[in-house]
């Protein structure tokens, strides 16, 4: 079943207090959220709010650092920082009940052979994936488009899938963001079908500019119907900027699709 969650860092507005954001998301009919970095919040307070509005946290990110703004996974010299941030994310996921962690990859180092950075990522994800599996948690690698995030290591789906395949663990999977895919590769339906079995999470936004679906060039409702037809069993996260005209940021998504929740 294809279920939907809202990225509460973005929507309905990042300027709102957390309680107001979560209340509006619940009132719009959703039962799940993702938050980029809940580690930055008081976890007890956040857990209380999630319970109050009957929202499940389905995804969070590992935290970057100022010297590693894209993450640590492929950075050979960042061994200690990778594990510190991974441990932090794992503790947060366990506390809040999240079952997915997006592991930020890091930047391409031109002076190093690409294969060396891939090897570092694979080794770390094998060890991290084994630990996450004990907690029932899936780790995710995402491709980011090189226009919004120049210098990132994973800028094509093949980059992320290469790492996923090399790790070879069932709980290390690809995070498929249709916005980034449209900017870099297009052919959204066929490309998803080609590697649907390796996808552990989906995110959606319209292009250009990571805007609300229906305001750009992607027919996302059609794409999502095609995703459901593949048998994908998971969440699609709504991750886009609120409309500048302050209209309903969820109006594009049928109400009857919003409350679906996985039994996990």
Image (tube, rainbow, N blue to C red):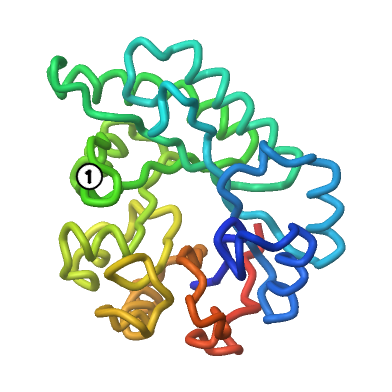
Q: Is residue 138 visible?
A: yes
Asked whether 251 or 132 is in front, the reply is 251
Image quarter hosting the C terminus: bottom right
In the figure, 198 relative to 150: above or below? below
Mark 1 residue crowding within 10 angstroms, few (<14) / some (14–19) / many (20+): many
In the figure, 14 relative to 90: above or below? below
Q: Position of residue 188 (x, y in %)?
A: 23, 70
Left or right of 80: which side holds 228?
left
Left or right of 190: which side holds 201?
right
Asked whether 138 or 107 is in front, the reply is 107
Q: Position of residue 222 (x, y in %)?
A: 32, 85
Q: Position of residue 195 (x, y in %)?
A: 26, 57
Q: Write down the quadrant of residue 248 in the picture.
A: bottom right
Asked whether 54 or 198 is in front, the reply is 54
Left or right of 191: which side holds 7?
right
Q: Which residue is mark 1?
A: 155
Residue at disc 1, secondary structure? loop
Q: Write down the quadrant of residue 124 in the picture.
A: top left
Q: At x 18% / y 46%, what residue is drawn?
A: 158
Q: At x 48% / y 39%, what residue is drawn?
A: 139
Q: Is residue 157 visible?
A: no
Q: At x 61% / y 60%, what residue is drawn?
A: 14
The count of marks equals: 1
Q: At x 22% / y 45%, what residue is drawn?
A: 155
Q: Position of residue 55 (x, y in %)?
A: 74, 64
């Amino acid at each position: 079943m294809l279920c939907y969650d809202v990225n509460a860092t973005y929507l309905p507005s990042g300027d709102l207090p957390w309680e107001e954001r979560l209340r509006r998301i619940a009132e719009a009919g959703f039962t799940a959220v993702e938050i980029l970095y809940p580690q930055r919040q008081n976890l007890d307070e956040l857990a209380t709010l999630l319970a109050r509005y009957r929202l499940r946290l389905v995804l969070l990110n590992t935290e970057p650092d100022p010297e590693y703004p894209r993450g640590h996974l492929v950075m050979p010299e960042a061994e200690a920082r990778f594990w510190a941030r991974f441990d932090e994310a794992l503790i947060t996921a366990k506390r809040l009940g999240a079952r997915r962690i997006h592991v930020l990859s890091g930047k391409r180092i031109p002076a190093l052979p690409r294969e060396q950075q891939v090897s570092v990522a694979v080794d770390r994800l094998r060890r991290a994936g084994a630990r996450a599996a004990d907690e029932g948690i899936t780790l995710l690698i995402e491709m980011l488009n090189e226009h919004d995030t120049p210098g990132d290591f994973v800028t094509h789906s093949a980059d992320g899938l290469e790492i996923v395949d090399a790790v070879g663990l069932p709980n290390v999977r690809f995070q498929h963001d249709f916005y980034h895919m449209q900017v870099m590769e297009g052919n959204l339906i066929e490309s998803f079908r080609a590697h649907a079995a390796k996808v552990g999470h989906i995110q959606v936004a319209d292009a250009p500019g990571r805007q609300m679906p229906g305001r750009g060039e992607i027919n996302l409702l059609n794409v999502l119907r095609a995703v459901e037809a593949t048998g994908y069993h998971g969440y699609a996260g709504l991750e886009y900027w609120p409309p500048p005209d302050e209209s309903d940021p969820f109006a594009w998504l049928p109400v009857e699709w919003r409350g679906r929740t996985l039994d996990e």
